Amino acid sequence: QNSLIEGNGGLTLKNLAQMMGIDIEARLLAGKNASPETLKSALIEARTLAAPPQGSLAEEIGSRVQLLELFQLLQLKLEQQNTFILPLPLPFLEQGYLLAEKRNPESGEEGKAPLLVSLHLALEKMGNIQVDFLHDSNGLFVRFSSDSEKTTAFAAQHQEELREMLSDLPLRGISFAVGAESPARTIMKTMMAKGDSMFDARV
């Protein structure tokens, strides 16, 4: 919350991406040093040390590396849409990531551009959830949506708790809706929004 207020939200997200190793290849291509103390580096080293190489542990670690590499590919594509993606490898999530989009301000003042941050989550017991945070010069607007009326109604019953959690920001409104899609489906639709493809037809 404080990072958003102080205008450092983008830097915070960038640091999280660096900690995961999402930008390792990009930094190497730019001639910069890639810190070995990242999640991806640790996973690659653990996969190398795992014995036997074809065992279940090595395969499990390998699947995590592949997941990070998928997010690297997604980020490469989403940069064309001025969008940042951050995976959320949390134990209570089946799937989860954050999307942040810096919109062009009508006034032409870059520092006052509205910032849209969306959480796309899939939880075992609550299903698919999407939470959109739109922050502009008027304050913060929050939209919560899920794939079931029951989950949405439950969230609406606790909106006062959400207001208290966001008390440091001028909260202008909260809305609740039904219709959230799975994180995987949402990201595919985002990728195809401008006719882009994740796959190279030459392969």
Image (spheres, helix red, strand yellow):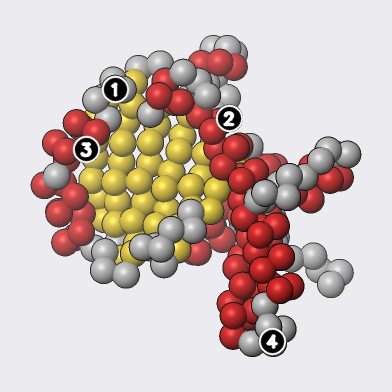
Along the viewing direction, whichever of 187 and 33 lies nearer the viewer: 33
Name which residue type carries label 4.
Answer: Pro
Residue 30 spot, x, y in % from top left: 85, 39
Report, in whole angstroms, how far the alpha carbon at label 4 lies from the one at label 2.
40 Å
Disc 3 versus disc 4: nearer the observer: 4
Q: Are marks 1 and 4 in contact (CB under 8 Å)?
A: no
Q: Earlier in the sequence, mark 3 or mark 4?
A: 4
Q: Earlier in the sequence, mark 1 or mark 3?
A: 3
Name which residue type carries label 1.
Answer: Asp
The residue wearing badge 4 is 52
Report, in whole angstroms, how far the alpha carbon at label 1 lies from the one at label 2.
20 Å
Q: Earlier in the sequence, mark 2 or mark 3?
A: 2
The residue wearing badge 2 is 11
Disc 4 versus disc 2: nearer the observer: 4
User: Quick check: 105 above or below 197?
Assistant: above
Disc 2 versus disc 3: nearer the observer: 2
Residue 168, label in figure: 1
Residue 160 spot, x, y in % from top left: 14, 36
Could you tell me which secondary element the residue under label 1 belongs to?
A: loop
Residue 164 spot, x, y in % from top left: 19, 31
